[in-house]
Image (cartoon, rainbow, N blue to C red):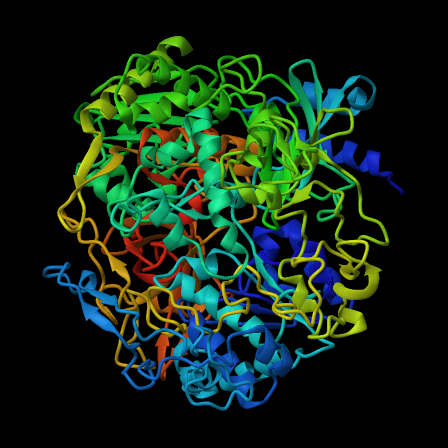
Amino acid sequence: MTTNLIDIQHSDVIMCTNNMAENHPVAFQWVMKAKERGAKVIHVDPRFTRTSAVSDIHVPLRSGTNIAFFGGLMNYAIQKNLYFKDYVVHYTNAPFLIDPAFKTPTDLGGLFEGLEQTGKGGSDPHLAETYNKSSWKYQVDAEGNPKRDLTLQDPHSVFQLLKRHYSRYTPEMVERVCGIPQAKFVEVAQLYCGNSGREKTGTITYALNLTQHTNGVQNIRSLCMLQLLLGNIGRPGGGVVALRGHANVQGATDLELLYHELPGYLAMPLRDAHPDLKTYLEKETPKGGFWVNKPKFMISLLKAFYGDAATKDNEFGYQWLPKRASADAYSHQHIFVDMYKGKVKAFFCDGQNPAVGGPNAKLARAAMQKLEWLVVVDIFLTETAEVWKTPGTNAKDVPTEVFFIPAAPAAEKDGSLTNTMRLIQWHEKSVNPPGEVQTDAQFVCTLAHRLQKLYARSKKERDQGFLAANFTFGEKPDHPDMELVLKEINGFATEEITDKDGKVVYKKNQPLNTFAHMTDDGKTASGCWIYTGVTVEGPDGKLVNKANAHKPPDKTDYLAHGWTFSWPANRRILYNRASADLEGKPWSEKKKLIWWDPEAPGQTPDKKGKWIGLDVPDFNAFLAPDAKGGDKPFIMRADLVGAFFGPLNDGPFPEHYEPIESPTRNLLSKQQNNPVAKIWSLPDQKNDLAAVASKDYPYVITTYRLTEHHLSGVMSRYLPMLAELFESHFAEISLELAKELGIANGDKVTVSSPRGKIVARAMVTNRLKPFKIDGKTVHQIGVPWHWGWKGVDSLPGSRGDITNDLSATVGDPTVYIQETKAFLCNVKKVEV
Amino acid sequence: MSLSRRDFFKHAGSAGAGIAAGASVFDLTPVAAAATTLKLTEAKVHTSVCPYCSVGCNQLVYSKGDRIIDIEGHPDTPHTLGKLCPKGAATIQLSNNPLRPTKPLYRAPGSDKWEEKPIEWMYEQIAKRYYDTREKYFIEREPDKDGKEVVVNRLDAIASLGSACIDNEECYLISKLNRTLGIVYHEHQARV
């Protein structure tokens, strides 16, 4: 999230694209607060939900057509001249000129320039294509700087390419593709785009509604681009509100429980691209922007992993890190494909339930039943732990050894969770966990110590990194002191650090105050550079844990900088330099956040001028607006500006393609699907797909969550207070479809896809309406996915079929997320 | 009738206990009684964070001995103003729950039942499985795209998943363990 929940109240218009009132109800109060202050609320969602009920406008949109909708809004803003021109010209790459060889789908029938056959896919066309991005680049001058046209008129400027690309996304096209009547679309477009400029800002919220698609990343890019076009990033009441699904999705991402990165968003080395540390740093470090400091962060991470064993002479232990064989490998979906195919032999599963919660759950269960061994750490006995008890499975046929370790919830341990707005918040241990329940940290450290014992005599070079890694924090080796773990994440001096006059700046082991103090010579260690500042040394020499600070906000600090700690550097709103104009003055008094004070004391006694205001500047606090780069707010980008043109694996601009399973041909171009989407080929009919406009699977299905349940149900189906709140698993079906199929409210129905079939109760409702797509009626149903075969005995409704048995193993080409928000199904009444 | 904030929570607490008792699996009556009479006088209070969605509602956890007796929203929290949703309000049942296993369990190959095992035995066995699998399948070197043998120090045979439900410090320790062992199938639910 670029912004802060509290700040939503300052929006003039809010567009919720997710069901915020039901899935993030406590955060939704800030939307209601904005509404009380006069803001308009728009809800874009196939279903009418409790979010729609309190919105000014509900816009039903066929699942899987978000880019057509956002593209339509961008087109509207450009055609009606509603975009924020000063912001776009100076703070984005709109004026940059692109290589003349670059072509867009407007010219190439739905494709971008550079689609190539790789020859890797064999008979599978979906694996055969990739983009050669050689023309997707800026024109540069003799010094290598990007050429710009500040009038935005050059036909090769990003702005003109963008304008031409989205000129196809007319209100008529939006109606045909999304099923939104033109008049309604224009009303929404005028309302949202009309709140732009110096005095107005709008915000957009999203969640998994946009991510779970084969163009998930482009969905999010399209909304970010709309926000850039309207000048909404970095300003009060603006921004992008990303609402994560779990208590620590943000933190687990920052600390990188993800295949492609190391903690702090550093690339996980690739075998072919990164053979040694020098090459890694050369390739991964951009020439401009704040990431020029990457070598300091990477080397500090290696020091945190390998301690004293990481030295300049051994590339700080770089060769001990595993090297990925390919960028197209190891993701969540790859795990279960490769497990099913026998490459992955063993599985550690902590606090996650892929037997229910992941895509193509039948595949996941079949894969896990082939494992040699499985370790599950969880609060309750999940379907994953009991995969050998899957209904229809004979336990004798499952050779897998399973180890189940009971785990402790947050209230029984110390630690921090990072919420959706980047707040690192500490929770205290209130009681000892019962019985032999282990904390996850205790499990990991104990296992690591046991393994180090088994490897203690190894002289092999490959084991020396692991043997050097420290898993002891505090006096009890297997019971880590969690504040000391947080301190390692924060970063500390590995030896005494002195300034040029010999004065001690940091004692050995002292926590670092800021990542600006990190070095690339091994004198600092840090497990995740963006968290630096969360622990500091107090005047008494003791560790101060700012994640456990609870100073309430006051009139001078509505963003509550004393309440826990927000990464990076306790900033509450990212890119906040963009809240001021080129001269450093707020775009408007009403929307002020930070500004340049030319009279404030400067960096040294002889200088004046500093950025001050209501937030920690996301900028060099002493860089004057008229200095080089002083008017460029997007400091994490090498070119320092927001990107309309931003090459992903599937194109520099988002383009509408149909979901892999769709009820219609693509009405925008002849290219049906994202040409580089990932579709896995699997044996045994494990990933069969429905054809376009399939007669066997004629209805669109979207999956979603409920206020009263949580994800795969592990934290709700076993809790009577929650499990009793729904009497059954259900499928939402429109009145119209129910009438066609002879289904009454409460009837048992089957919902099927080429992958599986489930039984649920029909919830016949006018919350869903059929869409008119290119003149034809398209029905869509909605099915929540919280149920599995386990639950509370006395509450039969706590158990139910697994919705994810229906979804497919297909993925976005950049991040490999699945497409569970839009695919095809059939619905039939169960005759009794 | 005017209710003070404290009174309101007293009533809310009793209602919750009633619901649970009605489900006949839970008897929270003693807890409810404790919450209404002893919460302020004898209970310890700790700050916590709701473990469900990502809003990060701060909570106050009241406990007596090793028993949590009540969990409510932390009224000072700037971004939540002390509120909790139905899931947040049910957090206490993650701890106080008869369905919760408190002993390690082992399932042998082909078996149709769990066996309780001492935690020490579990650690010993799990460490041995990691060791054996790593020794058997570790890839120290392999050809790169040009066919040249290069060091990769990779372990493809063990996959690791999770979690967005655990703490930052725990995520870091898992990253550190997996990466120093050579594990590359390393993911959690943010991907899905």
Q: Position of residue A195 (x, y in %)?
A: 67, 78
Question: Does residue A697 sit above or below A71 in this rendering?
Answer: above
Residue that extends furthest to the right in the rendered view of this protein: B2
- Asked if residue A751 lies left or right of residue A97, the reply is left
Which is nearer the eye, B1 or A31?
A: A31
Q: Is residue A101 left or right of residue A63?
A: left
Vertical position of residue A300 compared to residue A153: above or below:
above
Which part of the image, by quadrant, shows the N terminus of chain A? bottom right
Whether A468 is drawn above or below A640: the answer is above
- How many labels sit on residues? 0
Q: B98 or A62: nearer the eye?
A: A62
Q: Residue at x 60, y 77 (%)?
A: A90
- Residue A373 in percent (x, y) is at 26, 25
- Residue at 40% across, 57% down: A212
User: For this rendering, which residue is in front, A822 or B54?
Assistant: B54
The answer to whether one can see residue A729 in this image is no
Q: Position of residue A485 (x, y in %)?
A: 56, 28
Left or right: where does residue A343 sit relative to residue A254?
Answer: left
User: Going 57% across and 72% down the picture, which residue do you hit?
Assistant: A228
- Relative to A70, is A502 on the left or the right? right
Picture residue at 24% right of the left edge, 70% below the top: A692
> Which x, y percent locates residue A366?
23, 38
- Furthest residue in direction front, as rendered: A501
Please indicate, yes or no, whether residue A499 appears anywhere in the rendered image. yes
